[in-house]
Amino acid sequence: MPVDSSIAKGLIAMLEQPTTRRVFAGAVVLILLIMIGCSKYLTVEFVNQSGKELTICSVSQAVAECKSVENGAAVRLIFHQGHFTVTNEGRDWRYHADVPEPFEKYVPNNGDPVRMVITEDLALYAVEHGMSFDSVTDSSQPVGYPVMPRT
């Protein structure tokens, strides 16, 4: 549908006004800053303290992202709805882990990963920001943690 030339001329005249131009430019800049500042995905960093090499997958209905991780090493994955699988020597363990609460205690800055550790008994522990992976205990865990695997 063609644009009425009088409407187009009116819009151009309005944008030529200094105040309107500043407001419009400010709105565009604000929208761009919000888009840049917001991370599209929440990530999770797993530290493997299981004593064996693992393959960890973050699973959603549409995609599975998998990475191998040696004992003592860390790997980052996208937090797809909190569904994870861990594989070792042909055995699979499934986990469902909600984002730990209060969120700010575990992810204080936009873009920081949720930090988790997998122990020898394959329990999944949430790690507070600033806390070492080695100092995690059952009593330091948020509601729903540690998460035990389902086979």
Image (cartoon, helix red, strand yellow):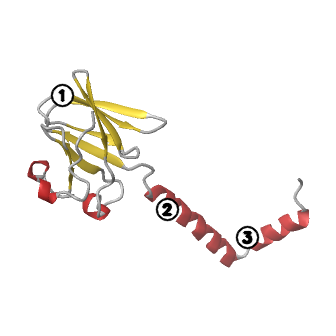
Which residue occupies 27% across, 37% down? 150
Whether label 1 touches label 2, CB < 8 Å: no
Q: Secondary structure at mark 1?
A: loop
Q: Secondary structure at mark 2?
A: helix
Q: Position of residue 101 (x, y in %)?
A: 29, 61
Q: Which residue is mark 2?
A: 34
Question: Which image quadrant: the C terminus?
Answer: top left
Q: Which residue is mark 3?
A: 15
Which residue occupies 29% across, 56% down? 100
Q: Amino acid at mark 3?
A: Leu
Position of residue 5 relative to residue 42, above or below, is: below
Whether label 3 touches label 2, CB < 8 Å: no
Q: Give me the C-alpha separation between circle 1 and circle 3.
A: 61 Å
Q: Position of residue 98 (x, y in %)?
A: 33, 52
Q: Give me the C-alpha separation between circle 1 and circle 2.
A: 40 Å
Front-most of 67 and 11?
Answer: 67
Q: Position of residue 27 (x, y in %)?
A: 59, 68
Front-most of 108 and 27?
Answer: 108
Residue 131, by quadrant, is bottom left
Q: Position of residue 148 (x, y in %)?
A: 22, 43
Which residue occupies 72% across, 76% down? 17
Q: Residues within 10 Å of mark 1 (few under 14, many from 20)?
A: some
Horizontal side of residue 8 vs 64, given as left or right: right
Q: Give me the C-alpha separation between circle 3 and circle 2.
A: 23 Å
Q: Amino acid at mark 1?
A: Glu
Q: Which residue is mark 1?
A: 53
Furthest residue to the front? 151
Q: Secondary structure at mark 3?
A: helix
Front-most of 99 and 113?
Answer: 99
**Badge nearest the viewer, 1 or 3:** 1
